[in-house]
Image (cartoon, coloured by chain):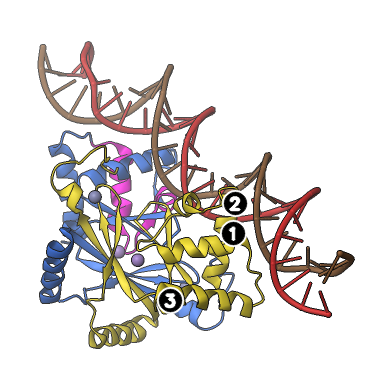
Chain colours: A yellow, B blue, C brown, D red
Amino acid sequence: MNPRDSRTAVTALLADRGYRLTAPRRQVLDVLVASRTPLSAAEIHRRLENRRINLASVYRTIYVLRRLEAVRVTDAIGAEQRFELADPFSAHHHHLICQDCGRIDDFEGCPLEERVLRAVNRRVRRSRRFRVVQHELRLIGACADCDRGRPDGAERRP
Amino acid sequence: MNPRDSRTAVTALLADRGYRLTAPRRQVLDVLVASRTPLSAAEIHRRLENRRINLASVYRTIYVLRRLEAVRVTDAIGAEQRFELADPFSAHHHHLICQDCGRIDDFEGCPLEERVLRAVNRRVRRSRRFRVVQHELRLIGACADCDRGRPDGAERRP
DNA sequence: GGTAGACTGCAACTCGTTTGCAATATGAAT
DNA sequence: ATTCATATTGCAAACGAGTTGCAGTCTACC
Ligand SMILES: [Mn+2]
Ligand SMILES: [Mn+2]
Ligand SMILES: [Zn+2]
Ligand SMILES: [Zn+2]
């Protein structure tokens, strides 16, 4: 699904469910559609064209977009939450997370083959009575910048 | 590595690196070794035998255990951090996370075959110059209790 | 254009985590 | 065993991401 279509689809979804299309919602959505990495609420806020929009509204918009399953949450472990378009509106993918600087990048595709996934789902279904709905794979390590000595002023994470 | 050995190994590691073996450290370690699910700082604190130990000391102990790579962090997304023994001291495994109640359970084994992992590592190494050090797989869905209507007083998560 | 009420900005609040500091306990040396 | 330098603790205050109550505003619909 291309950005243009994602925007239209989510907008329609909002209207469809009786939500109003307000300035904060339109702009937050635009920022999310335009980004190729998951963003924190503060980052989204910083990228809004109309800077009078309150950070609380960013959070509230994310909340409704999540209920519509248009947005999902992820994060570097123990860091702020990060948000991105959910599966129907962007291709299934996973993340590269830098241990040092905390940077998160998309990793196209999924190394878990259909066959393996089904086997896993069946296994936990039986042995734990756990029903798997989605999965998330994080590849954790060192990004290009951090791998050769610390770059500019990048900090090492705690 | 069995619990007994993990405890000994981590204790030795502490001494080795010049850390003192204090009551808070010994007790936090014991709680972690005894648990089969990752614990939050508050949960660890609650399980300490000596309840005069301060929560801040739990956090500080976790901090040094992490630097020794004896403990790793995980979490349900957007929830408190959770801690557990790291790979050399416990078998490599992943987690089942309930979307509804936030419960986290261990999932023995790893569906990512050696072959696949190597291929993935090579791929991101080349295309992104990202060096993978570890990976984390979360199987997200509904636990046994949450799957059939809400149990006792369990809340649905936001 | 007028209206009901969904939604926003703001400021106050929550709660997990961190930190400065004076008091205490540890490990090593005697 | 006693002493000592200092690593570590308890406490309380601070921090920061995320949430919430409320009065005023804007949207969707007529
Ligand atoms: Mn992504
Ligand atoms: Mn675990
Ligand atoms: Zn990095
Ligand atoms: Zn559950």
Can you say whether B145 is above or below A43 in the image? Answer: below
Helix, strand or loop under label 2: loop
Q: Chain of mark 1?
A: A
Tag 3–tag 2 contact (CB < 8 Å): no
Beta carbon at label 1 within 8 Å of ligand 1: no
Stretch in magenta: B21-46
Report the amino acid beneath label 3. Phe
Which mark is first along the chain, 3 or 1?
A: 1
Crowdedness of circle 2 by 10 Å Cα count: few (<14), some, many (20+)?
A: some
Q: Which of the pair A16/A157 is nearer the observer? A: A16
Q: In which quadrant of the rendered image does the N terminus of chain A lie?
A: bottom left
Q: Chain of mark 2?
A: A
Report the amino acid beneath label 1. Pro
Q: In which quadrant of the rendered image does the C terminus of chain A lie?
A: top left
Alpha carbon separation for disc pair 1 and 3 = 20 Å
Q: Residue A107 appears in which quarter of the rendering? A: bottom left
Residue under label 2: A53
Alpha carbon separation for disc pair 2 and 1 = 6 Å
Tag 2–tag 1 contact (CB < 8 Å): yes
Residue under label 1: A24
Helix, strand or loop under label 3: helix
Residue under label 3: A89
Report the amino acid beneath label 2. Ile
Which mark is first along the chain, 1 or 2?
A: 1
Q: Residue B16 appears in which quarter of the rendering? A: top left
Helix, strand or loop under label 1: helix
Q: Position of residue D29 (x, y in %)?
A: 76, 78
Q: Which of the pair B25/B41 is nearer the observer? A: B41
Task: Say the numbered circle drawn on residue B111.
Answer: none
Q: Is residue B1 left or right of residue A3?
A: left
Q: Position of residue C15 (x, y in %)?
A: 53, 49
